């Protein structure tokens, strides 16, 4: 009699356990991330960095002699005038700055820009530059989806109206995809295409585009054309005014410099985007500070006139110094015989 009772009790216990387990919440497939939430690394695909359905114009395109050259060769300026900026692609927020309230058309404002940098988790990041004071809506470490608002556009940093002689700031959004850097918010820009830009996906200077970046949970009202073919990295534009840089740090040291240096380091021609050896270095460097010549010139030590003391036979050249002008020529010779180094961004 005892065995049937134990069997029934065991069966009831197993049934109750099964019911309790089925009532527990389902564990998502991605550890630590909701299955229906933002992902990192981010999914592929870029959309224009403003609210879906709105139209904005490209005020400066890629490869210009103004400010989009060197590190910023593949950047775009959009005419956002204190408008909402949204993420062109999802990822993890890396850098945020929004305490600056200074700007103008001068290199003195090159360190005054507000910005947000989003790491995509695949060796690239997105830079959103010239943001308005105290407008950031995200924090470092936050994972966001494409289309989420991140800040408001502004006129901090080097922002120009384009009118000759006008040094007042002009609001716009500087956007670029760049190589990921752990230490600098500004690194070498890379070619990019947008799924909501017709034809080849590359915005053209002077053209206007409607954004298809409606954000998560909103209906997609503009047809998208996914583009996954890497573009060729080959920046060639040189600045017309090397002193007018959007950012001084780091300097574009890997761009083609003097003609003689091109023999040892050829410019990156027809280089695939995925080949890191041909992409200019992103090592953070500051603009070299010029060192006054007297610091490198040996201090002359007074010596008796050579005619008053005959020099010993074994050391006539050593103890018979040349005139002081000759010593000066020896100091200047390395500078006059070398090719002047190019200025940053030049």
Image: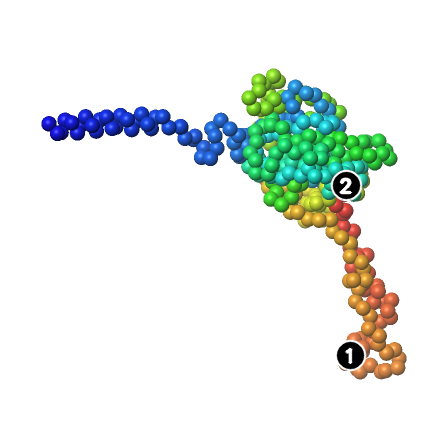
Estimate the x, y position of residue 297 in percent, counting from the top left: 80, 64
Q: Which percent across, then down, holds residue 72?
A: 70, 37
Please report the residue visible at 65 percent of the width from the left and 34 percent of the height from the top: 136
Image quadrant holding the C terminus, namely top right
Query: Would you place residue 45 above or below residue 65 in this image?
Result: above
Tag shown at residue 315: 1
At 57% from the left and 18% from the top, the residue drawn is 219
- Which residue has dot 2 on it? 109
Q: Quadrant of the N terminus?
A: top left
Q: Nearer the viewer, residue 196 or 160?
A: 160
**Up-down relation of residue 334 to residue 4 (above or below):** below
First in sequence, mark 2 or 1: give its number. 2
Q: Is residue 180 left or right of residue 251?
A: left
Q: Which numbered disc, 2 or 1, marks the residue closer to the eye?
A: 2
Q: Is residue 63 above or below residue 286?
A: above
Residue at the spot 81% in from the left edge and 31% down from the top edge:
162
Other residues around mark 1 within 10 Å, as few (<14) / some (14–19) / many (≥20): few
Residue 322: percent from left, percent from top? 84, 71
Name the residue located 86 percent from the left edge and 69 percent from the top edge: 324
């Amino acid at each position: 009699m005892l065995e049937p009772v134990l069997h029934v009790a065991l069966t009831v216990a197993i049934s109750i356990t099964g019911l309790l387990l089925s009532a527990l919440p389902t564990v998502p497939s991605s550890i630590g991330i909701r299955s229906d939430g933002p992902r990192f690394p981010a999914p592929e695909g870029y959309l224009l960095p403003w609210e879906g359905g709105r139209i904005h114009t490209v005020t400066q395109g890629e490869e210009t002699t103004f400010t989009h050259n060197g590190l910023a060769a593949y950047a775009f300026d959009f005419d956002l005038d204190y408008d909402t900026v949204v993420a062109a692609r999802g990822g993890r927020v890396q850098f945020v700055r929004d305490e600056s309230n200074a700007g103008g058309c001068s290199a003195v404002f090159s360190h005054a820009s507000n910005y947000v940098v989003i790491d995509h988790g695949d060796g690239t990041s997105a830079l959103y530059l010239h943001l308005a004071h105290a407008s950031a809506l995200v924090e470092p470490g936050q994972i966001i989806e494409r289309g989420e608002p991140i800040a408001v556009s502004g006129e901090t940093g080097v922002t120009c109206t384009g009118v000759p002689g006008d040094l007042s700031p002009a609001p716009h959004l500087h956007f670029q995809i760049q190589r990921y850097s752990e230490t600098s918010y500004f690194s070498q820009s890379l070619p990019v295409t947008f799924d909501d830009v017709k034809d080849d996906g590359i915005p053209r200077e002077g053209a206007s585009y409607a954004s298809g970046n409606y954000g998560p949970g909103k209906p997609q009202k503009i047809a998208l054309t996914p583009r996954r073919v890497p573009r060729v990295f080959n920046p060639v534009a040189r600045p017309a005014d090397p002193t007018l840089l959007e950012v001084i740090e780091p300097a574009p040291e890997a761009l083609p410099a003097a003609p003689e240096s091109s023999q040892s380091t050829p410019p990156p021609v027809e280089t695939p985007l995925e080949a890191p050896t041909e992409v200019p270095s992103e090592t953070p460097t500051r603009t070299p500070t010029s060192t006054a010549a007297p610091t490198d010139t040996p201090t002359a030590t007074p010596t008796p006139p050579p005619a008053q003391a005959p020099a010993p036979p074994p050391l006539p050249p050593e103890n018979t110094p040349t005139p002081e002008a000759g010593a000066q020529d020896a100091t200047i010779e390395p500078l006059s015989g070398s090719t002047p180094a190019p200025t940053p961004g030049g």
